[in-house]
Amino acid sequence: MNDIENVVSLKNVKKAFGKNVVLDGIDLDVRKGEVVVICGRSGSGKSTLLRCIDQLETIDSGEIRAAGHLMGFREVKGKLVSLSDAAVARQQRDIGMVFQNFNLFPHVSVLENIMLAPTKILKRSRSEVEQEALALLEKVGLPDKRNAYPRQLSGGQQQRIAIARALAMKPKLMLFDEPTSALDPEMISEVLDVMVDLSKAGMTMIVVTHEMGFARAAADRVILMHNASIVEDAAPQEFFENPKSEHTQLFLSKILQH
Amino acid sequence: MSWSWPYFFDYMTNGLMLKGVWVTIWLSIISMVIGLALGILAALMKMYGNGLLRYIAEFYIWLFRGTPILIQLVIIYTGLPQLGIRFTVIESCILGLALNEGAYLAEIIRAGIMSVDKGQEDASRAVGMNWRERMWLVILPQATRTIIPPLGNQFNGMLKTTSLCSVISMQELMRSAQMIAQIQFRVLEAYCIAALWYLLLVSIWGLIQARIEAHYEKPFGSEEATVSDKS
């Protein structure tokens, strides 16, 4: 295993909420530029996995390396020491995350949503960041919405802005937590199109989704999580046509019924 | 002695009365600003502080919400000198009003922070904001929208609560009315003018508050009020 090539590397990651085990010893490596789709029933731990990688949740044991950081910890003489809130925040800058409910900042305009972190946290010059923000708006197909407030946009538009907001921090890794699950059907493709473009541009991505069309088209690997564990990890063709795990066979039979 | 319009109109623009109005205005504003800072601090300590900080905040809120402002003012101005701690009248008024206000505002601000969607915390963490940045850039600006109406209510109250400072001889509006009333014993006219001035101040504040509310509501405005897409 070449650690330098891996943008994400999880070793025996465990996490429980009380007695409810949500991650039961997860090992996962994602190489630079790879697109990994994670699917599975709700409650299988896939969203928690993403949230742990981005340190929105802390893990109970194991280790997570992502975007060049040992997430949440630093090594002092071979021992792991928890990082401060501010130090974790610095690690998080290198990872972009997109949420099911978009979570745009409702009190500021679209442009300000994108510019807030680069200008206020990285203290970069406004004019420079604005140029980049406008380019990002172009990229997600919403150049004319710069002055709108999130409330005035459709779900699909909000999610595309959320992607632009994450990209503005120039992340080395993008995490998508069911990015289309809260969208009306006719808006799903506009968001997936942006994600496909992003994958073609070489972004390393982990995507939790039920959009199997996206998995076929853009994923390098498809993973199935079941009961807090990874039970299938294969190339899309293998995953859909020749799944090894019975859980995958069952999962596919259920989602392909309709 | 019946009602006298000449006295009434004379008192309206009496120099002493106008000075009292002015003192009431700045005393209210200064006390409110300091009270707001105290309230934010106490709310954050109570919500995010470790054990000791949280206890300090809770004790402060408990103490100042649990005792009458009048007693607080009297203790600060006339009681504390017994311990060698001396404040001027003005200092005592600002201190008492601000400490009392801060305790109430702390709970209002806490409610405002709790009203912000949990997803905002996730989103601001995800772009790499530390606690301070999350608070000042994302959480508090959104909490403000919820905080403004009760905050305005508090300031409305503050304008009138300053009248209690007359007890420790602060020359604000109430005290001015008392002094004017004693000159010619035109008590009714003098206090009616003072009451009118309070009404006027509170009404002006109401207009200002409406503007502030409209400002913070703008991003959340009705569907029709769409912003022009052209920049």
Image (cartoon, helix red, strand yellow):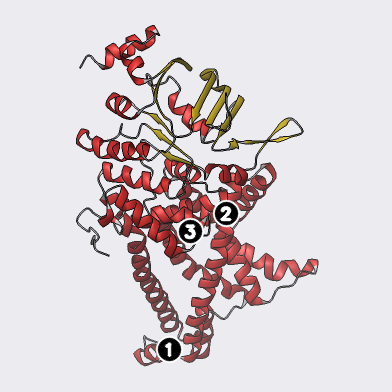
Marks 1 and 2 sit apart, C-alpha to C-alpha, by 36 Å
Residue at the disc numbered 3: A119
Mark 2 is surrounded, within 10 Å at the Cα level, by few (under 14), some (14 to 19) or many (20 or more) other residues, namely some
* In the rendered image, the vertical position of residue B192 relative to residue A55, given as above or below: below
Residue type pointed to by label 2: Arg
Task: Indicate which disc residue B11 carries.
Answer: 1
Q: Nearer the viewer, residue A147 or A33?
A: A33
Q: Do dots 1 and 2 share one subunit?
A: yes
Q: Nearer the viewer, residue A132 or B37?
A: A132
Residue type pointed to by label 1: Tyr
The chain letter under disc 3 is A
* In the rendered image, the vertical position of residue A176 relative to residue B217, given as above or below: above
Q: Looking at the image, is mark 1 or mark 2 earlier in the sequence?
A: 1
- x, y percentage for residue B129? 53, 48
Is label 3 in a helix, a strand or a loop? Answer: helix
The chain letter under disc 1 is B
Task: Indicate which disc residue B65 carries.
Answer: 2
- Quadrant location of the C terminus of chain B? bottom left
- x, y percentage for residue B68? 58, 59
